[in-house]
């Protein structure tokens, strides 16, 4: 099961890289979203995919016997999803603000902070 | 019991953020709470430093989950020093902010965001877990996004777009490396990683993860090919915000680099640290040359952040005990000096009317004391004796010479020289030459609020103290470096006597 997921992660990373190379801010952010999902899948896969019992110790026992599904990557991915969602939401609002204030969503046309015509000493 | 010392800075910062949020409708109360929170954080950090200095490393297992299973907080001397210096910077910049921020800035949640930022910074220094570090990075990042855009000018929006997008990429690279490391070792606890990494057979993948982390932390630290977001953004926000950013944020990246490449990835020093050495040299040179081409105070200083980061990475890259001492010393010296220079630039612009060097002048005649206050951090930055920067550079250059890395020593010295050029440029343009609008155009120092001058004087006093009484700081840095170079002791302190 790991191999197809690894291929999927590679595909998503490729797509994301292509999107992020764009000068269009919206494409950049879409690339970020896709890459975020690729990374989350990678963490999930890195914890090894096992179809075993849930990691719950039965009543009266001290430990689970035999193999069990690894819960830690899911906790990590959950945290990463929440954080990624927050960052993406902020970035989208910022993109909207940039469009309203600067009148463009092309990153190479945003030259307010570093104006091109400044005189060099 | 000593565990409370490690948790206290975090509790204080959370409490300050919560209290200032609740007091949002009452400006005076919020301001008082914010200042009180900043100084309480300073106290907590001093207590932490004291406890670590007396009792050695402090380890906290949250909820008493044993080490590799729960989230570990672990503070060694290096972590405690960084927490203390972060708290000092926070207190100084928040004091400066009181007269600077206007009602509309306050309403944009300046105070709560500042405390969340300090929370993230302190958390990153205190944690002992790689995933937890990621979470603190994000806490810091989201607060810095908010602070960056307070004011809402066009330049700020532009700067924020670049700052946000490049930091998002760095974040994902970091997470990618975390995933790969977890897949290889099954753990993310620093100490457990330090124990497990040498047993990983596939060093190729391990080095790949190390390089991903290097790129991610390097982007945060603004090292050579990855620094472009910094000069695009750091000169745009409020002065107190940019001073905190300049002092602390990139240094969290440097801290993470030092932590990762002393504790975790020492399996292939010839490869990883050699890359770091090249990166550090190029960072120094490009940073200082970039600064030479600028003519706006904060943009000059922003480029100098980059060149100074090179020195800290250089100490890590040389990877000898003396060089690591140099890195730690440089970090402490640099944070104080750089934050102070941004604050002084803020006061200078307030008195003379602009950050643009072409539009101002006559400050020495109008406010000679400000000239003295500028002189101290500026020439400390360039490395003049007996100021703090001299000792920091001396240690690093000496470490480079002992290691027979002639070219990096040369690069460090040339960068120091070129730094003098930039500093004398600011001195000559802003202070020495007459104001383009005539004699009375620059206001005297009395026109600046006392709350702006007090932190500048305090930070300048720190710089002088580090310079004149370098010995105690050297001893602290030496102990921090000795601990950094002994990962086995770190692992033993966190994991106890595991087989």
Image: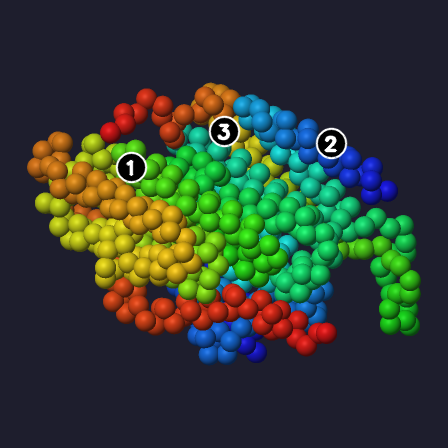
Say which residue appears at 63% left-offset and 49% top-offset. Answer: B207
**Disc 3: which chain?**
A
The percent coordinates of residue B2 (x first, y second) are 54, 76
Quarter of the picture containing the C terminus of chain B is bottom right
- In this picture the colour scheme is rainbow
Quarter of the picture containing the N terminus of chain B is bottom right
**Disc 2: which chain?**
A
Disc 3 is placed on an element classified as helix
Q: Is residue B94 above or below residue B284?
A: below
Mark 1 and mark 3, same subunit? no
Q: Is residue B214 above or below residue B439?
A: below
Check disc 3 and report the residue beneath it. A97
Disc 2 is placed on an element classified as helix
Check disc 2 and report the residue beneath it. A11
Q: Give how far apart the Cα atoms at labels 1 and 2 are.
A: 44 Å
Check disc 1 and report the residue beneath it. B292
Say which residue appears at 23% left-offset and 42% top-offset. Answer: B421
The percent coordinates of residue A60 (x first, y second) are 91, 72
- Where is residue A21, by image quadrant? top right
């Amino acid at each position: 099961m790991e191999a197809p997921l690894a291929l999927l992660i590679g595909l998503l990373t490729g797509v994301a890289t292509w999107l992020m190379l764009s000068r269009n801010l919206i494409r950049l952010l879409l690339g970020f979203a896709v890459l975020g999902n690729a990374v989350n899948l990678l963490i999930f896969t890195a914890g090894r995919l096992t179809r075993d019992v849930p990691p719950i110790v039965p009543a009266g026992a001290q430990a689970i016997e035999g193999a069990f599904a690894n819960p830690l990557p899911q906790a990590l991915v959950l945290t990463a999803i929440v954080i990624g969602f927050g960052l993406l939401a902020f970035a989208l609002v910022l993109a909207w603000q940039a469009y309203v204030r600067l009148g463009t969503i092309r990153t190479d046309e945003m030259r307010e902070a570093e104006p091109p015509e400044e005189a060099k000493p | 019991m000593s565990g409370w010392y490690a948790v206290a800075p975090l509790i204080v910062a959370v409490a300050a953020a919560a209290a200032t949020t609740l007091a949002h409708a009452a400006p005076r109360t919020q301001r008082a709470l914010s200042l009180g929170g900043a100084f309480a954080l300073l106290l907590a950090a001093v207590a932490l430093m004291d406890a670590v200095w007396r009792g050695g490393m402090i380890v906290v297992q949250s909820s008493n989950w044993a080490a590799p299973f729960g989230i570990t907080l672990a503070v060694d001397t290096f972590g405690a020093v960084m927490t203390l210096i972060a708290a000092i910077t926070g207190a100084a910049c928040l004091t400066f902010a009181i007269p600077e921020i206007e009602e509309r800035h306050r309403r944009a949640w300046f105070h709560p965001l500042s405390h969340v930022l300090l929370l993230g910074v302190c958390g990153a220094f205190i944690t002992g877990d790689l995933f937890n570090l990621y979470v603190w990075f994000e806490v810091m990042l989201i607060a810095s996004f908010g602070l960056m855009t307070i004011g809402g000018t066009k330049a700020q929006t532009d700067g924020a777009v670049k700052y946000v997008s490049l930091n998002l990429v760095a974040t994902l690279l970091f997470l990618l490396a975390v995933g790969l490391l977890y897949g290889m070792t099954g753990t993310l606890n620093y100490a457990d990683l330090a124990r497990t990494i040498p047993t990983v057979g596939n060093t190729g993948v391990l080095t790949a993860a190390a390089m991903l982390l290097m790129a991610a932390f390097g982007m945060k630290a603004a090292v050579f090919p990855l620094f472009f977001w910094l000069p695009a953004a750091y000169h745009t926000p409020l002065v107190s915000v940019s001073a905190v950013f300049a002092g602390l944020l990139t240094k969290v990246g440097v801290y993470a680099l030092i932590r990762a490449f002393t504790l975790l990835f020492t399996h292939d020093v010839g490869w990883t640290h050699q890359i770091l050495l090249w990166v550090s040299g190029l960072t120094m040179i490009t940073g200082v040359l970039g600064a030479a081409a600028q003519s706006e105070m904060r943009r000059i200083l922003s480029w100098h952040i980059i060149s100074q980061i090179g020195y800290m990475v250089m100490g890590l890259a040389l990877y000898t005990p003396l060089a690591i001492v140099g890195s730690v010393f440089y970090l402490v010296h640099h944070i104080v000096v750089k934050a102070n220079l941004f604050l002084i630039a803020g006061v200078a612009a307030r008195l003379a009317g602009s950050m643009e060097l072409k539009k101002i002048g006559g400050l020495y005649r109008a406010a000679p004391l400000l000239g003295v206050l500028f002189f101290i951090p500026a020439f400390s930055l360039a490395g003049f004796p007996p100021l703090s920067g001299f000792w920091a550079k001396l240690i690093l250059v000496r470490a480079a010479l002992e290691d027979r890395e002639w070219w990096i020593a040369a690069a460090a010295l040339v960068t120091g020289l070129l730094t003098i050029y930039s500093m004398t440029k600011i001195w000559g343009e802003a202070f020495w030459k007459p104001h383009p609008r005539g004699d009375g155009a620059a206001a005297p120092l009395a026109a600046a609020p006392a709350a702006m001058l007090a932190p500048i004087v305090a930070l300048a006093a720190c710089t002088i103290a580090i310079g004149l009484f370098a010995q105690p700081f050297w001893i602290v840095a030496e102990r921090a470096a000795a601990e950094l170079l002994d990962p086995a002791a770190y692992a033993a302190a966190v994991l106890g006597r595991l087989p």
